[in-house]
Amino acid sequence: MRAAGPGAGPHPGDWEVPGARDGCGCEEAIDRLFEYLDSEMPESDTARVSAHLAACHGCEDAAGAERHVRELLRRSCLESAPETLRVRVVAQLMVRQVRGGAVAD
């Protein structure tokens, strides 16, 4: 059995991980991670993957990292461009329109 814990990482094919004998090992958990996090799998499969993640520190770490990336993306999509940028873009568009299409540097 491989060592579990921080930094151990998922270990595909290791059937000694709790829950793996029930049909969900590290390989399946990692392969279906996006489907699991997006709630796009049948409830029976969700339960199996969830049980595996609860028992396998490496796979749970991978899921946690993906959740963190998703949260960062979600937050960054909510941010607006600074007002000064909008003013500069509008000014450049006006210059372009006045000069007949050539953008001034």
Image (cartoon, rainbow, N blue to C red):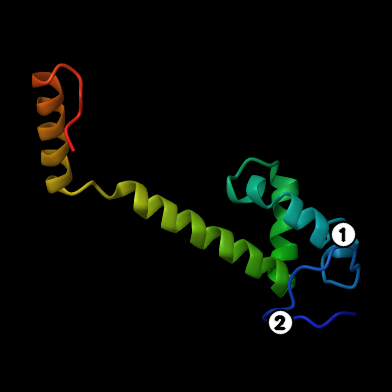
**Left or right: 92 with respect to 5?**
left
**Left or right: 99 with respect to 15?**
left
Q: Is residue 4 visible?
A: yes
The residue labelled by disc 1 is 22
Residue occupying image coordinates x 64% and y 48%? 34
Q: Nearer the viewer, mark 1 or mark 2?
A: 2
In the displayed structure, 55 sits above or below 34; it is below
**Can you say which quadrant of the picture contains the C terminus?**
top left
Asked if marks 1 and 2 touch (Cβ < 8 Å), the reply is no
Across and down, in percent, residue 70 comes to 49, 54
Q: Residue 40 got which mark? A: none
Residue occupying image coordinates x 75% and y 48%? 45
**Distance from the alpha carbon under mark 1 to that under mark 2:** 21 Å
- Which residue type does callout 2 highlight? Gly
Across and down, in percent, residue 104 comes to 16, 33
- Near-viewer residue (91 or 25): 91
Q: Residue 5 got which mark? A: 2
Residue occupying image coordinates x 35% and y 47%? 77
Across and down, in percent, residue 50 comes to 69, 59
**Can you say which quadrant of the picture contains the N terminus?**
bottom right
- The quarter holding residue 23 reads bottom right
Residue occupying image coordinates x 77% and y 80%? 4
Q: Is residue 48 visible?
A: no
